[in-house]
Image: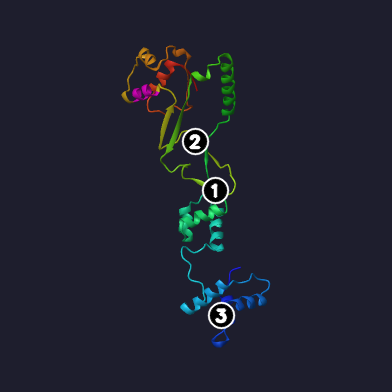
Amino acid sequence: MPLNERDRIEILMMIGVGDRMRTQQEVCRLFHEMHPDREPVSQSTVSRIERKYRELGHVRDAPRQGRPKINENVQQDVILSALENPHCTVRQVSRDLNIGKSSVSNIFKKVKYHPYRVRLIHELAEDDFDRRTEFCEYMMDHNNQNNGFIANILFSDEATFFLNGHVNRQNTRYWSQENPHWMQEYHTQHPQKVNVWAANNEFMRHFMDALYSERDKMDMEQLMHNTGRQNSAETFYQKPKNRNLPSELLWNFMDTIGNGTS
């Protein structure tokens, strides 16, 4: 157990002054007799205490270096901020409580709070559930009839970036010790947005070329030769539900090279 300031003063009194001074060994034995329930002090400890008093005139602890330790009140304030507003940011809590951002992050980490990200899901209409079931049955039937059916599907998807303050899952969080499974529905059609469309196939370079040049027709034989697909009837195209691209040329082109499925 470390010695406090009062213990050090007691050891100085045991050392004594003048011709009534005790040796370090005697001081250690006397301290142990007066405090039998405590860990005995060593002669080196007595020597350091005596030397510190002669050099500094006191036996107090030196001021600690580095940042002060966060007290319990500050920690409780940070936790309370997260409970009152789970969507708060580290910057907001730091500004409101006038403490460093690193301190806020350390407190959240200490109490095992994690910033969970929102999961955005499409708003579903009443008949969408039946359509999903029909689509699954359609895929299973065609896959049973043709084992290579899945491999010939050109899968595509699109992402929407809102420009009017709509929820951005990249910078929206929910602070909690357990996953709240936070979800929010959003409309598929919304003003002030940018749609990004992509598909995982070598056809993409021809699609983008068609979008920018707005060509009315494309040389299908040359396209099949470049991509190594001699039989376009084997290709199936999975379309996104919403046709939000700036040109209908792409969709018309896709319908000509394969059997489109929405």
Checking the image for residue 242, the label placed there is none
Q: Looking at numbered disc 3 in the image, what kind of residue is underneath it?
A: Leu
Q: Nearer the viewer, mark 2 or mark 3?
A: 3
Q: Nearer the viewer, residue 185 or 118?
A: 118
Badge 2: residue crowd in 10 Å (few <14, some 14–19, many ≥20) = few
Q: Looking at numbered disc 2 in the image, what kind of residue is underneath it?
A: His
Q: Looking at numbered disc 1 in the image, what kind of residue is underneath it?
A: His
Q: Is residue 260 left or right of residue 113?
A: left
**x%, y% of residue 224?**
39, 14
**x%, y% of residue 217?**
34, 16
- SS of the residue under disc 3: helix
Checking the image for residue 187, the label placed there is 2
- Along the polypeptide, which appears first: circle 1 or circle 2? 1
Circle 3 sits on which residue?
12
Badge 3: residue crowd in 10 Å (few <14, some 14–19, many ≥20) = some
| Residue extent of the magenta highlight | 204-211
Q: Residue 207 magenta-drawn?
A: yes
Badge 1: residue crowd in 10 Å (few <14, some 14–19, many ≥20) = some
- Along the polypeptide, which appears first: circle 1 or circle 3? 3
Q: Nearer the viewer, residue 230 or 47?
A: 47
In which quadrant is the N terminus drawn? Answer: bottom right
Circle 1 sits on which residue?
114
Residue extending furthest left? 213
Q: Which residue is painted at 65% across and 75% down in the image?
A: 32
Q: Which residue is painted at 42% across and 19% down in the image?
A: 254
For the residues marked 2 and 3, what is the alpha-carbon distance in whole angstroms? 78 Å
Q: Quadrant of residue 221?
A: top left
